[in-house]
């Protein structure tokens, strides 16, 4: 049974996009199809690496990985604006009982990654999605000196805005994608 995981993100400098790419690899390793899409930018001059998401792609996904950079312990305004357009999906309950998780990037180790991940979870909970993170069975959570939390994959870019992920960050993002794939398959087989 094929499941489709929507890897949905906003990225200004490339770090969140790099995490999205690694999550998509993990989704494929888990046996699902990864659909990588960007959130529509509020600034129309902002270029994106992947296509802009449609409401239908969100409705039809079997699972969701949602990513945003950190802005003062919260998701970027573009991401919040996107979720504000999903009322019709919410009213119909089209995301209820689908697995979801969040990922982020900040400029510093204590830049608000965990607060951002938690705040990003709120719209997913309102949509009735089933949140998942990264369990401590992943050895990189015990050893990472950069990004990575049990709340979801993260990256610490440093003050120079580097988008190159550490080995631990890459492995955690892939494990997260694989986990979302496996959960979506189990949940979809129980719905059919």
Image: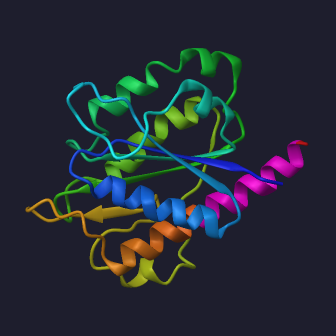
Q: Which of the 4 image quadrants contains residue 31?
A: bottom right
**Is residue 155 shown left or right of residue 111?**
right
Along the viewing direction, whichever of 11 and 148 lies nearer the viewer: 11
Residue 134 visible in the picture: no
Magenta: main secondary structure equals helix
Q: Is residue 146 magenta?
A: no
Q: Whole-percent x and y of residue 39? A: 40, 34
Q: Whole-percent x and y of residue 148? A: 38, 68
**Is residue 26 shown left or right of residue 32?**
left
Q: Whole-percent x and y of residue 72? A: 20, 42
Q: Which of the 4 image quadrants contains residue 147?
A: bottom left
Residue 149 visible in the picture: yes
115 lies above or below 53: below
The segment highlighted magenta reads: 178-191
Residue placed farthest to the left in the image? 160
153 lies above or below 188: below
Q: Which of the 4 image quadrants contains residue 26?
A: bottom right
Residue shown at the point (47%, 36%) measured from the top left: 122
**Is residue 144 shown left or right of residue 51?**
left
Residue shown at the point (25%, 53%) measured from the top left: 112
Please state, as top left, top right, bottom left or bottom right, where the C terminus lies in the image.
top right
Q: Is residue 188 magenta?
A: yes
103 lies above or below 171: above
Along the viewing direction, whichever of 15 and 120 lies nearer the viewer: 15
Residue shown at the point (31%, 41%) measured from the top left: 48
Q: Whole-percent x and y of residue 71? A: 22, 42
Residue shown at the point (65%, 34%) measured from the top left: 128
Task: Name the colouring of the figure.
Answer: rainbow
Please state, as top left, top right, bottom left or bottom right, where the N terminus lies in the image.
bottom right
């Amino acid at each position: 049974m094929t499941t489709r995981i929507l890897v949905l993100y906003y990225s200004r400098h490339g770090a969140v996009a790099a995490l999205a790419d690694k999550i998509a690899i993990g989704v494929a390793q888990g046996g699902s199809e990864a659909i990588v899409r960007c959130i529509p930018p509020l600034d129309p001059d902002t270029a994106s690496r992947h296509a802009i998401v449609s409401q239908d792609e969100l409705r039809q996904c079997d699972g969701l990985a949602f990513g945003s950079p950190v802005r003062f312990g919260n998701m970027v305004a573009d991401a919040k604006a996107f979720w504000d357009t999903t009322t019709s999906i919410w009213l119909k309950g089209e995301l209820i009982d689908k697995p979801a998780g969040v990922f982020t990037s900040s400029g510093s180790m204590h830049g608000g990654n965990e607060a951002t991940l938690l705040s990003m979870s709120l719209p997913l909970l309102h949509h009735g999605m089933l949140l998942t993170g990264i369990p401590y069975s992943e050895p990189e959570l015990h050893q990472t000196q950069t990004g990575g939390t049990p709340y979801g994959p993260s990256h610490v870019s440093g003050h120079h805005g580097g988008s190159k992920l550490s080995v631990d960050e890459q492995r955690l993002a892939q494990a997260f994608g694989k986990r979302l794939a496996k959960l979506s398959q189990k949940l979809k087989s129980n719905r059919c």
